[in-house]
Image (cartoon, coloured by chain):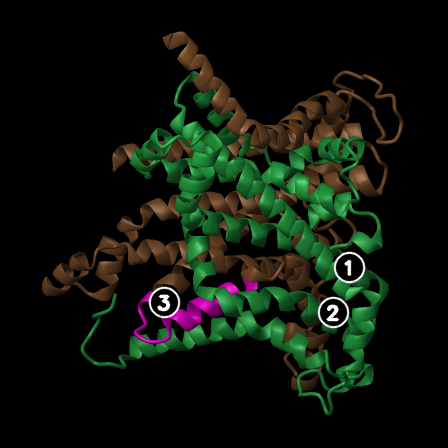
Amino acid sequence: MAHQNATKRNLQLLACTAPALIVFITMKIIPAVMGFWYSLTSWNGINPKKPFIGLENFREIFTTDSYFWDSLLFTFRYTIWIVVAMNILALLLALGIESQRRGKGVFRTLFYLPNMISLVIGSFMWNFIFTKVLYYMADTWGWSFLDHSWIGDPTFSFYAILTVALWGGTGYIMIIYIAAIQGVPEVLHEAAIVDGATPFQRLRSITLPMIAHSFTICLFITLNNAFQVFDVVYTLTGGGPGRATQVVAINIYEEAFNNSNRFGYATAKSLIVFAIVLVITSIQLTVMKRREQEL
Amino acid sequence: MNHTSDTRYSPRRILIFALLISYALFCLFPLVLALVNSFKTRSEIFTNIIALPEHLEFGNYGRSIKSMRYFRSLLNSAFISTAGLTGIVFFSSIAGWALCRFKGKLSTAIFSLFVLSMLIPFNAIMIPLYRIATVLHLSNTLWGMGWIYSGLGVGMAVFMYHGFVKGIPLDLEDAARIDGCNLLMTFKNVVFPLLLPITATIGIMNLLWMWNDFLLPLIMLQSPSRYTLLLSTNMLFGKYASDWPAILSALILSALPMIIVYVLLQKHIIKGITEGALKG
């Protein structure tokens, strides 16, 4: 009887989860499994045959594909910059907003506004600024420090990409920090004020330790997002000039859909990216677990 | 941080206020410049890019509405997001509930599958996903996009529903069962109404994601008549490379729906985003 009951419960469970499982397995699990198979073929996306070539794709990636490694290196560089800059900026903005008596809501609303708009639209607007407005300012007002080829020169296009990414993404991280700061019990601050602590001392000894958990969350949200960046680079520089700002997502996209239609080869690259993301995520989970045990 | 000092306007607070104002200007800068210049003629943009337009050149908007098929694209975007969200909410609410109520080895296994899949980055599956979508005739159709988004979105949503159901007492469901409700009726009439707060959060998160997503439609949709707002904007940018008034008015038009939604629902959106970030 108990056994029958368990079977019935399992059937009910399966019936309720079936719709979600079906779409999810079709769109996520099967592609992930297929990816492993494709990476071992020289399939070109059109040919019904998918010739098996073993680890040949991986050999080619590791020995000859310097563009891929350049794009990976550039992505790492971009990621480090974004993780550091976005977290510092977002934390400062959150602290700044929370230190005000008036206008908290207005600032929060304005700072989050760029996040509502797709980075595709944002990048095109910034493209106008970088290619037209800044030149105009440099010419008319003599602001020569603006007189650079912001999109055409690799050094400056890197900063252009960073600017737009920060513009479009910081608000979200700031919101998380604000929620954390608001969660710090008011009594702690009151007690510290009675003891004569300066604002800076309270920031260092109360606020920052109390929001350490959100710091971990934000760190890994920015890390994951930055590593998979596509929209902002694709629409702002297209990976150029040349391949100077090509991130790894663009490298894979172009390999599969634009240049050569080498689906098998591009899939092999995407698996390498997958492996890197897995490493990042497992570090994240370990760190988070350790933190929770400490608390 | 509220009781820094007794003086209302300490120099420190004024300095911070000034810095916040400058960051607010930075946030608005591209939007305002795009708006101002979208009403100028082409020659006016080159002579004075900062000033207000001499007269409002609405022709720019007419030109971009026509060439990016604005209303068609808007409808496509709305259809895809609605279809995707409907799928995500219906499929994952009942799944998340069942996974919490029928505890056992099977539920643990299924739940782990959903959670672990959140680790799979989109880049890693986009090429095989394109293939599957083509085989199932889901690519280059609006319905297909809805299905694909459902599949990509349910993992996270199941996780969030599951977490929410844990906090709902069993009493009501037991009462419904004793009154003769079957499983589906219990879920539909008793459980689902209780899930509305988390459904709002999931809805906001997923709508923002699908509406602003670029890479998936870029891969899947080939016919311009099925382009989303972002694809049409992207196409227009490539086609009218030097016609800035048309491009800028197109950018304003594509940003407009989200800005309107934000102005109307700002408080709910910020709340939903905060909860979504902390629970996900």
Residue A214, compared with residue B16, is above or below; it is above
- Circle 2 SS class: helix
| Circle 3 or circle 1, nearest the eye | 1
Do pointers 2 and 3 mark residues of a single chain?
Answer: no
Q: Name the residue under label 1.
A: B232
**Where residue A161 sits: x, y (%)?**
63, 58
Please name the color used to draw chain A: brown
Q: Between residue A100 and residue B205, name the one nearer to us.
A: B205
Identify the subunit bearing mark 2. Answer: B
Give the left or right position of residue B46, taking residue A88 as reference: right
Within 10 Å of disc 1 (Cα), the crowding (few <14, some 14-19, many 20+) is: many
Q: What residue type is labelled 2?
A: Ala
Would you say residue B4 sits in the magenta stretch? no
Q: How many marks?
A: 3
- At 58% from the left edge and 68% from the top edge, which residue is drawn? B259
Q: Which chain is green?
A: B
**Which residue sits furthest bottom?**
B54
Q: What span is in magenta?
A: A96-114
Do pointers 3 and 1 mark residues of a single chain?
Answer: no
Q: Residue B250 carries which label?
A: 2
Q: Is residue A272 something that shows in the picture?
A: yes
Residue B132, compared with residue A179, is above or below; it is above
Task: Measure the alpha-carbon separation of dots 2 and 1.
Answer: 9 Å
**Where residue A156 sits: x, y (%)?**
66, 61
